[in-house]
Amino acid sequence: MKMSVNERREAILSILCRRREETVANLAQELEVSRRTILYDIEALTLAHPLETVRGRYGGGVRVADGYYIGRKYLKPSQQELLKRLSEQLDGEDLATMNSILSEFALKTEK
């Protein structure tokens, strides 16, 4: 039975969260669709998930941001910035606690 678009996109996201990166060609072969279909899916998924496409000789690939996993709750950028500003006023155990919150729930987007 053929997967629906949503099922296929969920499968792509699940694969990427497990493997952290994959080629477009491998995803297409594994999910039994064309490379173009995978590229459309990746384009749609990047609107809601921290995915990055990578150019390559054999059709390129895609990777997921460090620390990103399906179902995990993350701070919004505005929340993260507020906590960083507030942490400047903290010290000792309070600062350590704030840093642990930021470390656990702030999405790492640096490359």
Image: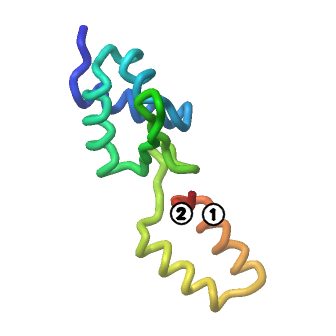
Q: Residues within 10 Å of mark 1 (few under 14, many from 20)?
A: few
Residue 32 versus residue 106: which sits nearer the camera? 32
Name the residue that disc number 2 marks: 106
Q: Residue at x 35, y 32 (%)?
A: 10
Q: Residue at x 67, y 66 (%)?
A: 100
The quarter of the displayed image where residue 55 is located: top left
The type of residue carrying mark 2 is: Ala
Q: Residues within 10 Å of mark 2 (few under 14, many from 20)?
A: some
Query: Among all residues in the image, which is located at the extreme right?
Result: 92
Q: Is residue 97 above or below residue 74?
A: below
Q: Residue at x 50, y 37 (%)?
A: 17
The type of residue carrying mark 1 is: Ser
Q: Is residue 52 above or below residue 79?
A: above
Q: Residue 61, image x and y in percent?
A: 45, 35
Name the residue that disc number 1 marks: 103
Q: Residue 106, image x and y in percent?
A: 53, 63
Q: Residue 14, image x and y in percent?
A: 44, 32
Q: Is residue 26 above or below residue 109?
A: above
Between the C-alphas of marks 1 and 2, the distance is: 6 Å
Q: Is residue 110 above or below residue 97?
A: above
Secondary element under disc 2, as helix, strand or loop, is loop
Secondary element under disc 1, as helix, strand or loop, is helix
State the mark number for residue 14.
none
Residue 60 versus residue 15: which sits nearer the camera? 60
Marks 1,2: beta carbons within 8 A: yes
Q: Is residue 90 left or right of residue 23?
A: right
Q: Quadrant of the C terminus?
A: bottom right
